[in-house]
Image (cartoon, rainbow, N blue to C red):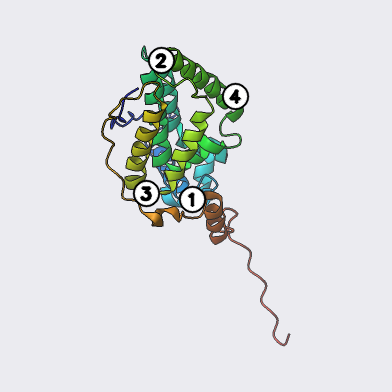
Amino acid sequence: MPDQTSHNHPEPVTAQAPAGLRADARRNRERVLEAAREVFAAQGVDAPMSAVARRAGVGVATLYRRFPTRSALVTAAFEDQLAVCATAFEEAMADPDPGHGLYTLLEKVCTTLVTDRGFETVFMAGFPEALDYDRERACAEERLAHLVQRARDAGRLREDFAPADIPLLLLAVSGLAAQPPATALPAARRLLTYLFQSFQAHPPSRPGPLPPAPALDLSGLHRPPAAPLAAATARAATAGTDRGPRPRRPARSAGR
């Protein structure tokens, strides 16, 4: 297992628009998806659909024509990130060096988690109907257990490392998702380097240098409100916008 995290970013995967869309409809779709990623990253995946429509500069009716449910929008918005993680799994399974394969997979997943809070919510907690979460989780757990066993058998991972240590690692790293990306990414890489050095079956007597320390102090422990609370606050601020204007109350008669 390498002594230091790689500084290469995962290659983006372009989400495919449905075939047959006109150029203007394709542009509208991409604008909606970009707005959805921005809104979900700021407010969580429970953010009002009207907030996404406003950010995209389209009407709510247009948004619902393209994405009839929130689940459809969440799935399409995070298609690229999910594809990156799926590709990382395939590459890890095919890597002839089991330790390197496991290490690279976890680095890609962790860096994706901390750079997109909306994706962190989908990946860590699941989103009803947006993903077949139970099936995907069971498949991921089976693959991770296989990767861990391969790395242990190859002498690249300490014998007492358990597959349950991976969710522990992901929980630790996902706590950085509330930080700005400029802080979260170097912090995640430094933390991963510490952890991976301790995971090795035969750690070097003199470990390699750590990535640069992030700009963090104790004030970073005061996290902003959780996404559901932020989303509820936003929803309260935009109450009624998804349902159209409220009817006016009748004026009182003179003398009443």
Residue type, numbered disc 2: Gly
Q: On the rendered image, what quadrant is the C terminus found in?
A: bottom right
- Label 4 CA crowd tier, 10 Å (few <14, some 14–19, many 20+): few
Residue 22 position in % (x across, y down): 40, 33
Residue that lies at the very extreme toward the front in this rendered image = 205
Q: At label 3, which amino acid type do we have?
A: Pro
The label shown at residue 43 is 1
Give the image quarter of residue 253: bottom right
What residue is shown at x 47% (from left), y 20% (from top)?
A: 159
Residue annotated with mark 2: 155
Disc 4 secondary structure class: helix
Q: Nearer the viewer, residue 46 or 180?
A: 180
Say left or right for 40 vs 194. Answer: right
Q: Is residue 116 visible?
A: yes
Q: Is residue 17 above or below residue 32?
A: above
Asked whether residue 57 appears in the rendered view, the answer is no
Q: CA distance from mark 4 to mark 2?
A: 31 Å
Q: Nearer the viewer, mark 3 or mark 1?
A: 3
Please tell me in which quadrant of the rendered image residue 87 appears. Answer: top left
User: Please, is residue 178 above or below residue 202 in the view?
Assistant: below
Pointer 4: what residue? 135
